[in-house]
Image (cartoon, rainbow, N blue to C red):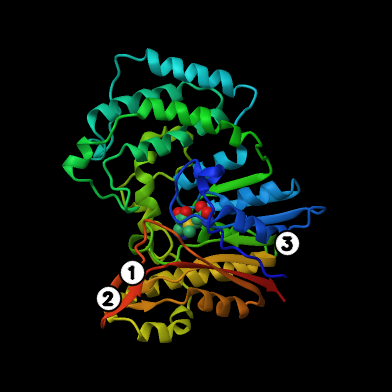
Amino acid sequence: MKTIDISYKDYKKRDDIHGTALYPAVMVGPAQKDILLDLIDKDRHTKIIDPFHGSGTALYEAATISSKVSLIGYDINPFANLIAKVKLQGIDLSSIKSDIIHLAEHIKQIDEIEMHIFPNSTKWFREDIIRDLTKVRLSIMQTENKRNRLYFWYIMSDVIRKHSNTRSSTYKLHSKKEDDISRIQNQVIELFLENVEAHYQKFSNGYDNFQLKKGNSLDLLRENSDNEFDICITSPPYGDNATTVTYGQFSMLPLNWIDRKDLDLEDWEYENYSVIDSKSMGGCMSNDSPNSQEEIKELLNSIPNAMQKKVIKFFNDYFYALDEISRVTKKYIIMTLGHRIVGGKQIELTDITMNALSKKGFGLELQLEREIFSKRTPRILAYKDGQPISSMNKEYVIIMKKI
Ligand SMILES: C[S@@+](CC[C@H](N)C(=O)[O-])C[C@H]1O[C@@H](n2cnc3c(N)ncnc32)[C@H](O)[C@@H]1O
């Protein structure tokens, strides 16, 4: 396989579909497409899985390459499930214009409303914003066409985030200062209607041959037979969510506004604001990988005792996922990975992953890297012995081929 430049320094998500709703730690769409272009044979049926699909970047890009791909995706987070579904299935072009007209009329006509409430709703939103978001919510619920309704929830999710009292500097829920809250400009209705109109054409090429399942992929992967997929393309979490990227906490505000009937739920997601993160990979020891501690013995010896437990928990799940991914994949595994720092020690997830997959009969075909330009992860985390400890400023892609 020839090497590929995936730096995409000037790439702006806002120019394509991936910038229409925010989700944490997403892949760079065109970079994933460049890789897949080399691996998908357009004349043949190709079955592809992403067991940690997040916002659906890789699955969406695969669908733009060939109409002969069938796509399977898993994610434990119902918000990720909604985002990926809307990108893949798109809108109903025959009725979107009239649905947008009805939506705008309904929002303007609503007068007396019962405010939508949920736990801590007044902590995370100002009262005038709750009133306007309630109007938008009630109006979306009037839309009969399901594809279009889900597209409206999708667009609303970004408006919710921009009008909430949580800081934009972190994916964790962390209240802004009183002054900053009072300065939020209430543009809920204008921004929602403007974005619905501005983006719908990006969703006009719906794709049908996909199936997304909401759930724990460590369980869902077991449902697949050996060598069922030609390609597994994914970006798993790089550590436990609670101390790496809190996908769950980030999603709780939109999840509390979206009508539960339109979400794929297992019934525990609203127990508290951190439950999705604690049920995610590395949060609870759900599966046993007997050799996992042996595989990371040297790493464990190099980090403080107090931090070893969370690393053990994460790798227990991670190795289990790698075992299952290598079992169900017939040809290529493509993984986008980051190297997080724990107790001042960088975890070389790329080497650990390549080593584990090589024991399962996969050889390295290509390794790529790119700089991450993110405002939410500081470039320097801390200083140790006067030396800067940098956070994840690079991401790595490994392409492994079954031998
Ligand atoms: C790095 S993100 C994937 C981002 C995605 N590649 C994109 O471009 O949007 C990792 C995803 O794994 C999901 N996740 C974590 N633990 C999981 C589990 N046990 N089962 C299924 N999904 C899980 C998270 O909810 C998150 O969406």
Residue 397 visible in the snapshot = yes
Query: Is the residue under label 1 in contact with that under label 2 (CB below 8 Å)?
Result: yes
Extreme residue toward the front, this view: 10
Task: Using the image, tell me which numbered label, if any, was put on residue 383.
Answer: 2
Q: What's the residue at 35%, 85% (across, down)?
A: 302
Secondary structure category for the residue under label 1:
strand
Of marks 3 and 1, which one's residue comes earlier in the chain? 3
Q: Position of residue 221 (x, y in %)?
A: 57, 60
Between marks 2 and 3 in the image, the one whose residue lies nearer the viewer: 2
- Identify which amino acid the numbered label 2 is placed on: Tyr
Spatial separation of the CA atoms under disc 2 and disc 1:
8 Å
Residue 321 vs residue 365: left or right? left
Spatial separation of the CA atoms under disc 3 and disc 1:
36 Å
In this view of the protein, which residue sits in the foreground, 199 or 338?
199
Q: What's the residue at 41%, 30% (across, down)?
A: 191
In this view of the protein, which residue sits in the foreground, 187 or 107?
187
Q: Quadrant of the C terminus?
A: bottom right
Q: Position of residue 147 (x, y in %)?
A: 57, 31
Q: What's the residue at 29%, 32% (across, down)?
A: 185
Of marks 2 and 3, which one's residue comes earlier in the chain? 3
Secondary structure category for the residue under label 3:
helix
- Identify which amino acid the numbered label 1 is placed on: Ile
Q: Which residue in the structure is indicated by mark 1?
A: 380
